[in-house]
Every structure is written in C-alpha cells, then in structure tokens.
Image (cartoon, rainbow, N blue to C red):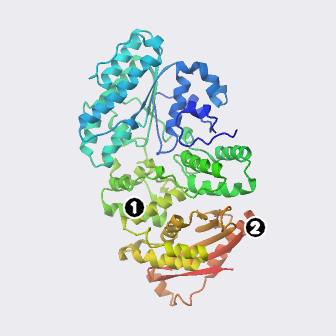
Amino acid sequence: MNRRVPYGIMNFAELIEKNSYFVDKSQYIEKLEKYQNPVFLRPRRFGKSLFCSMLQYYYDLKEASRFHELFGNTWIGNNPTDTHNQYIVLKFDFSVISVSEDIKKTESAFNQICVGRISQLKYAYPNLMYDFPDFSPDTDASTAFSLWLGYLQKSDAPQVYVIIDEYDNFVNQYITSHQDHLYQEVTSGDSFLRTFFKTLKEGRQMGIIANIFITGVLPITIDDLTSSYNIASFLTLDSSFESMLGFTQGEVNALLDMIFDEYQIDPIIRPVIQEIIKTQYNGYHFVDPDGDAIYNSTMLMYFLQDFCDKKKIPKQLTDLNLRTDLSWVKRITSSTENTRDIVSELLQTESIPYDEEYLVSKFNRSQFFDKHYYPISFFYLGMLTKKDQFFLKLPNVNMQKIFAEYFNELYNIDVSTRYAEMMQGFLNNPDLKKLFADYWQLYVGQLPEAVFNRVNENFYRTTFYELCSRYLSTWFTWNLERSYPKGRSDLEFVGKYHEKFAGIRWVIEFKYFSNTEWSRMNTSIEVFTVRDEDTKQILGYKEGLRYEYPQAHIQMFVIYCIGNQGFKVIEVL
C-alpha cells in the first residue's frame, strides 16, 4: 500500500500511524534544547502545529513505550537526547480561543480552554496527579496554572515541558477588526494574558517548568508582553533554524523520488512537476537571501495529495487557506490609498525596499502600523520574503497572483462576468494575439485613468496571467520569470501533459513604453516591428527550452504595451 501524502494532518502520531510521508525535521529537537524558552515565528501554513505535535510526543513521558514506533525512522530516534519522554507535557493551542467585543467573554473563553487543558492532565497522568483536586468553576487560567505547578513541585513530580501553538492567534483578531482598545486591554496592565505569561515565567524560575516552546505568526504580541515574559530566546531570524519549517530543495527532491517510485508515475513528467511546484510554492528566504529557498510545506502537500490521487496536475494550484484576506493588508496600511500604493508598487516592481534595522524578532503594535514597517509586517505574514539586504520581494507565482487579486478588488475590476466568450473562443482557436486583444479591451478597458501612471510591463504581465489562470487552469500552467542560461522569461503558457494543449509552450516577453517614450519614437503601432535586441533576447530562451523539452511545440512572442494607447503582439520565428 502506498504511503499517504499528509495534507491537513497536524498530529505527529497520526501521521506515523497512517503511514504518511514525513520530511524529517527531528534533528532540530536537539538544536532547540540548547536554548531557553525558544520563540519561533513563521507565516500561516508552514507546518508549525505538526512540529509542536512532534515535540509533544518526543518529550511526553506517557509516550515512552511508543518511542521506537513513532521515532524509530527519524534522525532523533537514532540520536536521542537524554530528555526524550522525561516530562509532563502541557500543550496549548490558542487558535481555538474565541474572541468577543466583551473582554470578559474573551477572558472566560481563555480560562475555559486553559483550565480545561490543565484539568485533563489529571487523567492523562493519573499516577502523578491522582489526588490533585478539581478546580472550581470560576477558577481563572493563571490561578489554576499556579496551583497546578505548586502541586507538582510539592509532590516531587517530573518537570513540565510547555508548548504554546498559535500564541498570537486570538489577539490578532482584535487587530484585524480595528478593535485596538481591546488588544491594548488584553496585552497591557494586569490583563489575564499578561498574568498568564507571568505565571509561565514563575514556573521557569521555580524549576518545575523545564522549557517553553512558543510558535505564532506575528512578533507584536510577544513584544507587548515583554515585561511579563522577558525570558524568551527569539530564533525566528536565526540562520541555524531557517529550514526548521518548510522544505528545502533537497528535501523536496527526496520526497519526489519516493512518490514517483511508489506511485509508479512516469518519470518523463517529473521535470514538469518540479517546474510547477518550484514556481508556485518555493522562493521563501527568511534569513539568508543567498541561501537555499524554502518551500511552503503545506501548499506543496496540497498539490501532491491531489497529484498522487489523480496522476494529473490539479486544476487549482492555490490552497485558498493560504490567502491572507485583504482586510489584513488594509488594516496594516491604515487607508485605502496606502493599500493601493503598496499593492500597485509590488505589481510593478515585485519588490520593495526595507530597512534591515527594522527586521527584528519583535516589535510593538504601534510600529506594526508604521509606514516604515509595512514591508516587515508583510514579511511576517508570508507575503514578502528577502530578495537581498535591501529589498523584500514577492516569493513566488502564488503570491504574485494573490496581489493581482488584491489590485482587482481595490479598484473594483470585474474579472468574473464578462470573459466567457473570450475564453471559449480561445479554447476553440488558441490564438495569443486574439486572447491579449480581448484582455486589453475587457480588462484594461476598466482601469481608471490614474492607474496608467503606475503601470509597466510587470503590471500587464501579472494581470494578464491572473486573468488567464482564472479561466484556463484546466488546460494550462504558467511560469513567471523562469530562469534560462541567457536570462529570465516574463511569462510562459505551458499546456498540461494530460489535456488538449499538451506539448504547447508559449514564451512571452513583455516590453513597455510610456506615452511620452512612445511619442519620441515617431512611429505608429501598426507599422512598429520587433526590435533586434528583443528578438535576440527571446530566442536566447528558446535554446535552453528546446534542450529541456525537445518534443515541445515552442512559440516565442514579444508583447509591446504602449501606455494606455494600445499594444502589439509579435511572434518571433
């Protein structure tokens, strides 16, 4: 029986028991033991919860009899530390805490989850806590935690390993809903959350808590709690841990080796699959922009699960769970105009300058909404990643598509009701010139005049791609900025190997002239011909592509966009 692709599995034991593929990150357990109270932040959908679950099963003393079963085929199973299965494990998941406009109700939800979790341990470890009294219904989380720690200390019980997953999840909801006063109330003074973190710190000082591992997305809450919890080791931007979550290229290659072998998939299609997943899900640099890029592990598993099931390229390459809602972007940038500015800038340039001094492991809520911190805020949300020491960039095609969707939403561009005839016509007669002409008429024709002051070839390329991907993803995939020995192509249409346009590869180079530049050229769109340097550039790509895919039907095009005046699509033979 073939192993399963573990998309959506967040429990480590379940993953092992169901014979699922597992990219082994267990070597980081040993590395983490060198740090006190580590805090590690990553964007959503990067495998944080599964990693927390692995830690839970590794340290939990009641799982000692299953150590070989669960970890026998892992690095840490062959190189165990002295601390494996030595602790009582207390694991919290703050994402399940519901929030309310009534802060007392939020506090009640917090208490219910935390007290309930502590109470469950009496039954999880009956030999250690058989006489621990039940909490009264009105006991708050911090009091319950403190009483429990005191009981363990007096009874000479083993130490506790505390795991907090999604530490910032519920308080972030106050930020996105513009309820800053409630966020302030939760994270300042003697709030229930600050008191809880003080109790964590006290437990470490008492020695009853052996260590605390915290994950989340944003650094602002941990900064606002600093005076209550000033014992953390921030590893988010530590190069030694850059690959702890997400997959490296080597890990992906090994995973594909197993999948293609066990599922008996024709190896001739492997280059195509590697091209798609690298374009869509790779590209993250959290620490070293010159190091190996990281894949979004959850997105990759989303793709591979469907691919293994159907032996076909999935129609939808974007997991909708990945998309950060535009409300987050609007909230960070404070105004619609600011949102339009940054979205338009990223569509044009695909990168944005940042001050490396601001890229720190923690900063407070007021900084999070400061204009100078916009790029850093997007970095922590996974929208941007390091390009170099001076610029952040969109990490991959997935995120480029999402920002094009943001643009359409911000400017009320219709991308859903007027394109059926255009797309059906293309399927009947795949003509790029006609397809782009329809895009210019139906899509570009909607753009407000002010937008044309901030367009360029990247803008036209990305919005054209986004529109086509909405309607043609059954038959095509796309590459943006695919690398060749002689440069990077702007856009490529690639017919899926199992659909009607199999074998088709269109390579497109976009060129842009502003209205002013065009007027200086003293020519007209009708008589304009492809420039020699553009011919040389795009034919250089053809050499590399022909070498990789000798059987493909390759066509090369240059698309010239002239301000808001018009365009010309020229095939280069």
Left or right, 143 with respect to 559, comes to left
Name the residue type under label 1: Ile
Which percent across, then down, holds residue 204?
41, 21
Q: Say which mark, if any, is on residue 342.
A: 1
Residue 227 in view, yes or no: no
Report the residue at 32% width, 25% height from top: 141
Left or right, 327 with respect to 56, comes to left
With respect to residue 563, does 138 lie above or below?
Answer: above
With respect to residue 549, does 379 lie above or below?
Answer: above
Q: Of helix, strand and loop, which one carries label 1? A: helix
With respect to residue 194, does 407 lie above or below?
Answer: below
Out of 175 and 338, give the one closest to the viewer: 175
Q: Of helix, strand and loop, which one carries label 2? A: loop
Which quarter shows the C terminus?
bottom right
Q: Quadrant of residue 118?
A: top left
Which percent across, then down, holds residue 7?
56, 43
With respect to residue 401, does 234 lie above or below?
Answer: above
Q: Say which mark, if any, is on residue 551.
A: 2
Residue 257 in view, yes or no: yes
Which quarter shows the N terminus?
top right
Left or right, 216 with respect to 424, comes to left
Report the residue at 56% width, 45% height from top: 297
